[in-house]
Amino acid sequence: NVEELRIQDQVNDIELSAWWLGKNYPNEKKTVIIVHGINASKKHFTQLIPASILVNSGLNVLLFDQRNHGESSCPTGRYFAGTKEWQDINTVVKWLNENKGISTGQIGIHAVSGGTLAAQFIMAERSDLLAFSLDSPIFDFEKIVKSELEWNGVPSILWKLAVSIGKLHGIDIYAKKPSDGIENLNGRALLVFHGKEDTRVPFIHSKLLVKYAKELGQVVEFIENEGADHNEALLLEPEVFESHLTKFFMTNLK
């Protein structure tokens, strides 16, 4: 029951490749958009496992490739650290509104790794999406630039140079802040998963995110995945995602 879609963003002249998993529609309109990370796509296990969990639980799912990824339009071949990719989530939300009659209050976001930046930026831009689940989120740009450099065998001391090079290519990581999204949650539902042994997006990102949210009075459900590396918890303990993801979206979507 997979419907292949080409969703048009006519303003930016971008076509998004997507899959609609709507075997529970129209009896159930609650729908989760799943957002992949950098250099991934809707075909990645971090997308397919949550999708199967949610569809089997009775929800609908829409998987899509962000711009410059997978089978979507590739105008620049670059990743903009969520500062432009959030618009792709927005395009998908509008498609669900217009083509499936699904209201924004019935739409949740589950984002993974680098995709959590786009999710946090759409949190900041919109106040009508009610539930956000973040798996291995990025929260501190300076920390992630340093750890990405180290991951690629480059000394982290060069992080300022990397930021400057990014600006030359139109990628300004300071144009938006993940904290803007957390500040705009205003009581909307937030679920965070993170492996405590994550070597790609260190666990400290989620600790800082959750701490900041709680300082603002935001309720956060925080699942700390013991012994798990980056996104590894999906494979090590899928039952944790089955129990928490399903309940979270069933409870918090209209």
Image (cartoon, rainbow, N blue to C red):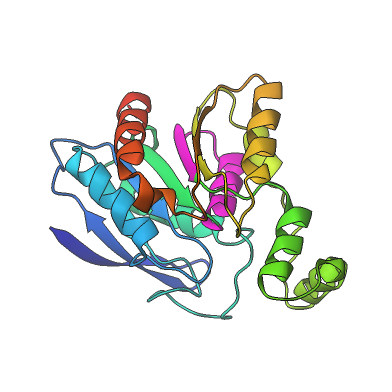
Residue 26 inside the magenta-drawn segment: no
Which is more toward the observer, 20 or 234? 234
- State the extent of the magenta-drawn residues as a range: 114-134
Residue drawn at x 85%, y 71% as measured from the top left: 158
Residue drawn at x 36%, y 32% as measured from the top left: 244
Residue 125 inside the magenta-drawn segment: yes
Residue 145, image x and y in percent?
Answer: 74, 62
Residue 51, image x and y in percent?
Answer: 29, 51
For this orientation, the residue located farthest to the top is 217
- Tell me if residue 211 comes above or below residue 121 in the rendering: above
Residue 241 horizontal side relative to residue 3, left or right: right
Q: Quadrant of residue 160?
A: bottom right
Residue 155, image x and y in percent?
Answer: 81, 72
Residue drawn at x 18%, y 50% as measured from the top left: 22
Residue 66 horizontal side relative to residue 180, left or right: left
Which is more toward the observer, 229 or 106? 229
Residue 191, image x and y in percent?
Answer: 48, 34
For this orientation, the residue located farthest to the front is 227
Q: Is residue 94 visible?
A: no
- Tell me if residue 16 comes above or below residue 61 in the rendering: below
Residue drawn at x 13%, y 36% as measured from the top left: 27
- Tell me if residue 190 comes above or below residue 81 in the rendering: above
Q: Is residue 138 visible?
A: yes
For the C terminus, the quadrant is top left
Total of numbered circles in the picture?
0
- Tell me if residue 219 comes above or below residue 200 in the rendering: above
Residue 195 horizontal side relative to residue 99, left or right: right
For the N terminus, the quadrant is bottom left
